[in-house]
């Protein structure tokens, strides 16, 4: 795809490359998209190094949720390779007191009752309330989660609980940056996205109304429009 920007798409926890199928289709005319899948790494820096190993020499980068933290680690390691950055449904706050204890019941549920039980407990809390009864959306999210094993999920949680403090990287980001999230995301809240905008020089912020944690699935057309504008 000579002349087209390379675009690397990073998934979040319990998501794989299928998360980005709509964006790969919609953006293929304007860029060369590549979606990655993490499943066997237990640290965010290890995920970042693996992504860089599989990336072209220079690229635009979208990191979703946990993938947003991986994207920040990639900026720490190799900022010269990243032409544009989009942090989607992401955050950069350090580990909070009690976070490990709050995550443990989901790990226990996955080991005891399986990944489908975990998906049924966790995923409805993340999407916008109007989408919880959408069978296609919930089945898609559940299918991705069930591709992981309980041990792989525990590894992702370990990576998040041992995450580096990303706040020192944010002011050094010089490339065009888009911060994109659902306005009603319970994890990557509007306040956290405002903090990202304030910390990253000249970043643009787009909050999608009536959208939860998965903009690319809950509001694909608005998400694709924002990504097209960001790609230039």
Image (cartoon, rainbow, N blue to C red):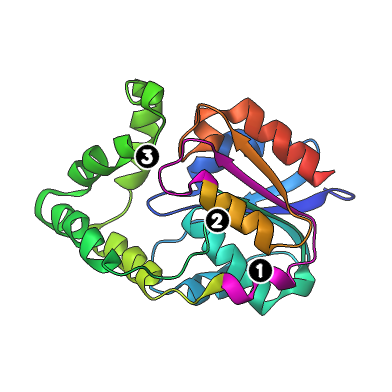
Q: Residue 150's x, y, as percent?
A: 23, 58
- Foreground disc of the pair 2, 1: 1
Q: CA distance from mark 2 to mark 1?
A: 23 Å
Q: CA distance from mark 1 to mark 3?
A: 26 Å
Quarter in which the C terminus is drawn: top right
- Residue located 49% across and 56% down the image: 37
Which residues are the magenta region? 167-190
Q: Which residue is mark 2?
A: 36
Q: Residue 156's x, y, as percent?
A: 36, 64
Q: Which residue is mark 3?
A: 126
Residue lying furthest left? 112
Give the left or right position of residue 214, taking residue 132 as reference. right
Q: Which of disc 3 and disc 1 is earlier in sequence?
A: 3
The answer to whether residue 58 shows anywhere in this view is yes
Q: Splitting the image into 4 quarters, where does residue 23 fall? A: top right
Q: Residue 122's x, y, as percent?
A: 27, 43
The numbered mark at residue 170 is: 1
Q: Residues within 10 Å of mark 2 (few under 14, many from 20)?
A: some
Q: Nearer the viewer, residue 119 or 215?
A: 215
Q: Splitting the image into 4 quarters, where does residue 199 fall? A: bottom right
- Residue located 38% across and 37% down the image: 141
Asked if disc 2 and disc 3 are in contact, CB closer than 8 Å, the reply is no
Q: Is residue 150 shown above or below 26?
A: below
């Amino acid at each position: 795809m000579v002349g087209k920007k390379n675009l690397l798409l990073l998934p979040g926890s319990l998501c794989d490359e299928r998360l980005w199928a709509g964006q790969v289709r919609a953006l293929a005319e304007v860029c060369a998209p590549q979606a990655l899948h993490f499943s066997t790494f237990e640290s965010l820096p290890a995920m970042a190094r693996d992504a860089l190993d599989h990336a072209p020499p220079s690229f635009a980068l979208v990191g979703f949720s946990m993938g947003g933290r991986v994207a920040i680690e990639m900026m720490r390691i190799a900022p010269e390779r990243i032409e544009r950055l989009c942090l989607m449904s992401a955050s950069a706050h350090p580990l909070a007191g009690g976070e490990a204890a709050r995550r443990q019941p989901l790990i226990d549920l996955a080991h005891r009752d399986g990944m489908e039980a975990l998906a049924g407990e966790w995923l409805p809390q993340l999407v916008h309330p109007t989408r919880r009864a959408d069978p296609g959306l919930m089945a898609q999210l559940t299918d991705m989660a069930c591709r992981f094993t309980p041990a792989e999920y525990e590894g992702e949680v370990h990576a998040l609980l041992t995450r580096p403090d990303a706040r020192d990287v944010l002011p050094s980001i010089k490339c065009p940056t888009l911060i994109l999230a659902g306005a009603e995301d319970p994890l990557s809240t509007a306040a956290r996205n405002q903090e990202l905008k304030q910390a990253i020089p000249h970043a643009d912020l787009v909050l999608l109304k009536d959208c939860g944690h998965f903009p690319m699935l809950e509001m694909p057309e608005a998400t694709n429009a924002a990504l097209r504008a960001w790609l230039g």
